[in-house]
Image (cartoon, rainbow, N blue to C red):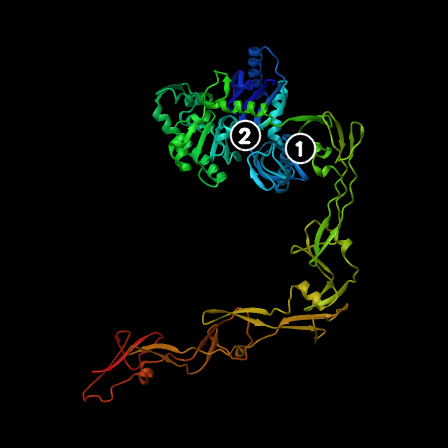
């Protein structure tokens, strides 16, 4: 088998290796190389500086070419789990007679399931303009004749079914990788996802029956993959990793990022660290001090990883396997064990030295070598995704084989939105007219022009590698426009007298509580109320009167506020009429609230409350006295808005002798006894004036 060039483009480091498959000893690494980015060119697994990342890739490529003395033209890569989308889908095939399910048939069935997953993703996304690439998939289960089996290949039956978990990334992530490879003259022949690739190397097939969590901790992201029942069943990503720890060191000691990265790595090899801060000051600290500085950042990272594992797994896994350079972060394994809820001995760090069936590449060491090895294994085993190119309007477009190739899909991959396939009709104008929805359509757009290899083409036409597609979008139609004068029915202007004032009676158009002019333009979403000038009801609406609702005045009675409803009196030419009365030019209309007198309120004074010998009594009113502004008013006086009325039952306040009838004296009174009177604890006489709430005591001594 031809050797494969596998390239791991990480946030901090670029690592490449050339490996081949050896049927006797598994896989053999022929050569390897690594280098770091000179500056931060990638964030969270996403390419931000194409030229800077390309410099690192070309350096690795040249080292490998020198070691092997062969040019490298093709490469297998992996994408980080940033913006990862995962879908589970099924596919089924039925045959009239039992057949043997060969590898090609099973692979075709898996491809069909991946297509189904892509359709599910496209229908579930809120933003349908986002285009996705499938970057890998894993079979979850196989069924033959309805019975679940571990491997469908070689089985015999009439009904075969598979389920897969497919992973997708936005095309912007994939295009970033393609742009970097294009700068260095490499052609991408295989693409997979980093957690899928890492799982190929880190977890042997026979161990995937266990419920394991694989966490690839790099610089910008921590990619997660979970196994159960013989396969990977879920993937996830935490958008933070080793850079969080480095930034904590840089912030505390005021360091350049590269210096902070060096300090972090030396925590595993030195007990005392020496470095210079950004201002040139030499700093010497113990390892324990730096560990205290990064503790909160490591705790945050561990909690994020644990939360994602527990969410994806719907429970606690049997063990957690850490790989990637970030897995060597001090305290991380211990904190992951605590937050996931498993013993510390169930959290392990997988390294190159522990991999079986991998020969060569002795210089590759540590957990950061797992992912590039996995990328190579995925490419050698055909688990990566191959693709070819077509040209759309002069631009090269990558078409993955998993995406069934039609002209429409090629246009989508080129960033041409579906709405431009056909000339967009002009926007319709939609508004409400007196609570009735009205729509005015825009004009139709022109059709797009499409050719494939110089011949007229169709959107559903299949394409092949190297096809030349030219697309000219259709011209959009004109948006609908309308003015109020276009919508108003014919009317006749009328002059009327309203409550003694002569004025014009014309139709009115209201928009969102605003009076509009006939020359105003109607805009989309308007809520329009049109009031004609036909009858009394139209006039009352224009004036804001609703005869079903009563007029309201507010008065105060003994300090309490009361609202009084009044009926309206409506007269047309001096006569009472109904609201449907037609109005003519010269009519006189008067609308007034009907008056109400004070007597109609039937006001009654309240009794006064006193306490006599410990018993609360009510002293009844003697008469009804109504006053306004200190003067007594008659019940026939008309009620006015804002009046402040006083209602009393006495012209003069009661005196103590008035309450003696309420006192219960003994049946017999001893000769020589005297009557003792008090009010509120003070001695009183028969003529003492009483106030509401007073306490009176009358006893014989």
The answer to which image quadrant residue 132 occupies is top right
Label 1 secondary element:
loop
Of mark 1 and mark 2, the one earlier in the sequence is: 2
Residue 608 percent coordinates (x, y): 38, 77
Residue 207 in view in this figure: yes
Q: Position of residue 674 (x, y in %)?
A: 21, 84
Please state the horizontal and vertical placement of residue 177, each as a whole percent of the image: 60, 25
Reading the image, the residue beneath label 1 is 403
Quarter occupied by the N terminus: top right
591 lies above or below 214: below
Q: Please tell me which residue lies in front, 150 or 562.
A: 150
* Residue 196 - label: 2
Q: Crowding near pointer 1: few (<14 within 10 Å), some, many (20+)?
A: some
For image coordinates 72% across by 35% down, the residue present is 408
Mark 1 → mark 2, Cα distance in angstroms: 19 Å
Q: Quadrant of residue 471?
A: top right
Residue 693 at what x, y percent from top left? Answer: 34, 74
Quadrant position of the C terminus in the picture: bottom left
Answer yes or no: is residue 282 visible. Answer: no
Mark drawn on residue 513: none
SS state under label 2 = helix
Q: Is 256 positioned to the left or the right of 52 in the image?
A: left
Residue pictured at 38% horizontal, 31% vertical: 345
Q: Quadrant of residue 117?
A: top right
Disc 2 crowd, CA 10 A, few/some/many (<14, 14-19, 20+): many
């Amino acid at each position: 088998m031809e050797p494969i060039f596998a390239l791991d483009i990480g946030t901090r480091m670029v690592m490449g290796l050339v490996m081949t498959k050896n049927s006797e000893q598994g896989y053999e690494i022929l050569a390897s190389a690594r280098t770091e980015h000179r500056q931060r060119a990638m964030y969270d697994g996403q390419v931000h500086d194409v030229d800077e990342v390309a410099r690192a890739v070309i350096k690795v490529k040249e080292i490998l070419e020198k070691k092997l003395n062969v040019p490298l033209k093709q490469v297998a890569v992996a994408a980080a789990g940033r913006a990862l989308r995962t879908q589970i889908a099924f596919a089924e095939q039925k045959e009239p007679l039992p057949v043997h399910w060969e590898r090609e048939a099973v692979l075709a069935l898996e491809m069909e399931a991946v297509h189904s997953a892509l359709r599910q993703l496209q229908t579930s996304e809120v933003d349908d303009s986002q285009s996705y690439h499938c970057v890998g998939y894993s079979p979850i289960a196989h069924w033959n004749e309805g019975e679940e089996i571990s491997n469908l290949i070689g089985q015999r039956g009439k009904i075969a079914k598979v389920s897969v978990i497919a992973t997708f990334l936005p095309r912007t992530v994939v295009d970033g990788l393609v742009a970097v490879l294009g700068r260095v003259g490499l052609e991408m022949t295989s693409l997979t996802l980093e957690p899928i690739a890492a799982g190929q190397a880190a977890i042997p097939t026979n161990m995937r029956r266990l419920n394991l969590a694989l966490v690839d901790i790099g610089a910008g992201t921590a990619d997660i993959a979970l196994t159960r029942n013989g396969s990977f069943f879920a993937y996830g990503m935490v958008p933070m990793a080793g850079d969080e720890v480095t930034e904590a060191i840089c912030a505390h000691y005021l360091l350049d990022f590269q210096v902070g990265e060096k300090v972090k790595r030396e925590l595993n090899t030195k007990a005392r660290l020496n470095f210079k801060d950004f201002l040139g000051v030499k700093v010497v600290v113990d390892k324990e001090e730096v560990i205290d500085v990064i503790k909160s950042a490591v705790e945050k990272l561990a909690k994020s990883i644990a939360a994602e594992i527990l969410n994806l797994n719907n429970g606690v896994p049997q063990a957690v396997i850490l790989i990637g350079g970030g897995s060597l972060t001090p305290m991380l394994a211990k904190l992951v064990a605590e937050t996931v809820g498993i013993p510390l001995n169930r959290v392990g760090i997988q390294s190159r030295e522990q991999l079986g069936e991998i020969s060569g590449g002795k210089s590759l060491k540590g957990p950061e070598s797992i992912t590039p090895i996995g990328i190579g294994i995925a490419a050698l085993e055909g688990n990566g995704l191959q693709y070819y190119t077509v040209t759309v309007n002069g631009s090269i477009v990558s078409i993955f084989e998993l995406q069934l190739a039609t002209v429409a899909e090629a246009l989508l991959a080129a960033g041409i939105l579906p709405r431009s396939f056909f000339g967009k009709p002009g926007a319709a104008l939609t508004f409400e007219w007196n609570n009735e929805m009205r729509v005015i359509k825009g004009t139709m757009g022109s059709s797009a022009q499409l050719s494939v290899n110089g011949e007229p083409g169709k959107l559903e036409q299949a394409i092949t590698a190297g096809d030349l597609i030219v697309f000219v979008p259709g011209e959009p139609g004109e948006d609908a426009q309308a003015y109020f004068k276009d919508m108003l029915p014919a009317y006749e202007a009328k002059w009327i007298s309203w409550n003694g004032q002569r004025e014009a009676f014309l139709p009115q158009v209201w928009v969102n509580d605003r009076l509009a002019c006939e020359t105003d333009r109607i805009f989309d979403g308007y809520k329009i109320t049109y009031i004609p000038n036909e009858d009394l009801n139209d006039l009352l609406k224009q004036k804001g009167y609703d005869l079903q609702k009563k007029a309201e005045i507010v008065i105060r009675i003994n300090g309490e506020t009361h609202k009084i409803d009044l009926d309206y009196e409506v007269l047309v030419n001096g006569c009472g009429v109904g609201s449907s009365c037609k109005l003519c030019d010269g009519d006189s209309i008067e609308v007034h609230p009907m008056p109400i007198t004070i007597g109609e309120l039937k006001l009654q004074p309240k009794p006064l409350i006193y306490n006599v010998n410990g018993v609360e009594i009510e002293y009844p009113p003697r008469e009804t006295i109504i006053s306004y502004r200190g003067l007594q008013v008659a019940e026939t006086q008309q009620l006015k808005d804002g009046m402040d009325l006083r209602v009393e039952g006495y012209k003069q306040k009661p005196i103590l002798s008035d309450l003696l009838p309420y006192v219960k004296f003994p049946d017999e009174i001893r000769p020589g006894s005297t009557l003792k009177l008090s009010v509120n604890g003070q001695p009183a006489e028969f003529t003492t004036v009483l106030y509401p709430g007073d306490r009176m005591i009358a006893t014989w001594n």
